[in-house]
Image (cartoon, rainbow, N blue to C red):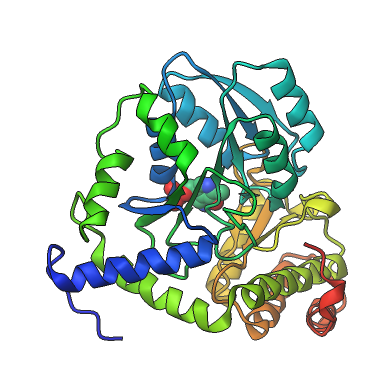
Amino acid sequence: MDAPMINHRGPEFKALLKELEDGLRWAFQTSHDVLVFPASGTGGLESVVANLVSPGERILAVSIGAFGDRFADCAAAFGAHVVRHAVPWGEAADPDDVDQILADEPEIRTVLITHNETSTGVTNPLRELARVVKGRGRLLAIDGVSSIGSIDLPVDAWDVDVAVTASQKGWMSPPGVTMLSVGPAAWERRATAQAPRFYFDWERAHKMQQNGATFTTPALSVLFGLREALRMMREETLPAIFRRHLQIAASFRAAVEALDLRLVAAPAAVSPTVTAVYFPEELQGDLAKAVFATWRERYGLIVAGGQGQLTGRIFRLGHMGAVSPDDVLAAVDALQRGLADHGYGVQPGIAVDAAQRALAEPETALAS
Ligand code: PMP
């Protein structure tokens, strides 16, 4: 696509920004304001804290993994008294537990939740969690970095006050832009919240965007990519995108099962965008590094490792955005070959066959 550098204070940029805002509202399924900042997803999360939290205030952070911990740490860095509801890694949060905490802690006004925990391959039951949080009248901010645009998150229908994502995930674009929706209750809170803010001040960003520009120099090249991604996504439609992610995740899980390996995620909480798998016992620890190198160097397969307590114990397959059934089969084949090269043998081709069968399953067989 033709993507020249343009004057970011001129009419072309105004049109680009308008198209992005419309497209993001469509993808977030919201009529709320959408803001874009040149930053990674962590910047989007920091903007939530900087705009909504006051030093000393008690807030609830529901953490089911490394990125939930990061959101909580960010709030603590801005002086919030963070009540951490930490769920064992591999499990999703239980809405009844969150309801109980909120019942016991009437002074908590804000709740931070990760929709899809990329470190463990777990998706939270967000619809139910949102019902609980909003039922108790609290403000709800969601880390949707690895979910929005890939996993259904209807912001308005679920009454989500703030939702954050980032260009490098399901948006099929280079890293460098964070995008978020801000609803009326969040704007109201922002007006009284006391945390220091400058770069990520939503109010100024919003005013600038209303005039067709951004406060700072935008990450123009990333925004061109994002525009193209949104056009592709509109063509595919959201229901088809969500279904494709479910199907592809199901096929990776079928391959993992055929390889006789164990998922990190509890069965009811498996993610449509990332599959986290325990290495066979004998390949855990230092040997895992050699397996990653084999996958990368011999088979061109990039596999992520574990984070925090899962370092050296697991591998993670990301499958969000532009992933096709052929990509799955090629990845699964490479996966099995790499493991076999390190002595983990199962019958050749068994994982690809299992993945292929799962890809042919009817939609009704898909777990979300
Ligand atoms: N939250 C989640 C759920 C993520 O997956 C990530 C990135 N993997 C982040 C936050 C942090 O985003 P970034 O690396 O873009 O700052």
Relative height, residue 161 to residue 236 (above, below) = above
Name the outermost residue toward the top: 56
Pinpoint residue 173: horizontal percent, then vertical percent: 41, 69
Residue at position x 67%, y 78% from top?
Answer: 328
Answer left or right for 168 relative to 125. Answer: left
Relative height, residue 224 to residue 92 (above, below) = below
Residue 174 appears in view: no
Relative height, residue 137 to residue 259 (above, below) = above
Pinpoint residue 320: horizontal percent, then vertical percent: 58, 67
Q: From the image, which quarter does the N terminus lie in?
A: bottom left
Residue 180 appears in view: yes
Residue at position x 46%, y 53% from top?
Answer: 32
Q: From the image, which quarter does the C terminus lie in?
A: bottom right
Pinpoint residue 247: horizontal percent, then vertical percent: 74, 74
Find residue 201 and report its image quarter: top left
Count of labels shown? 0
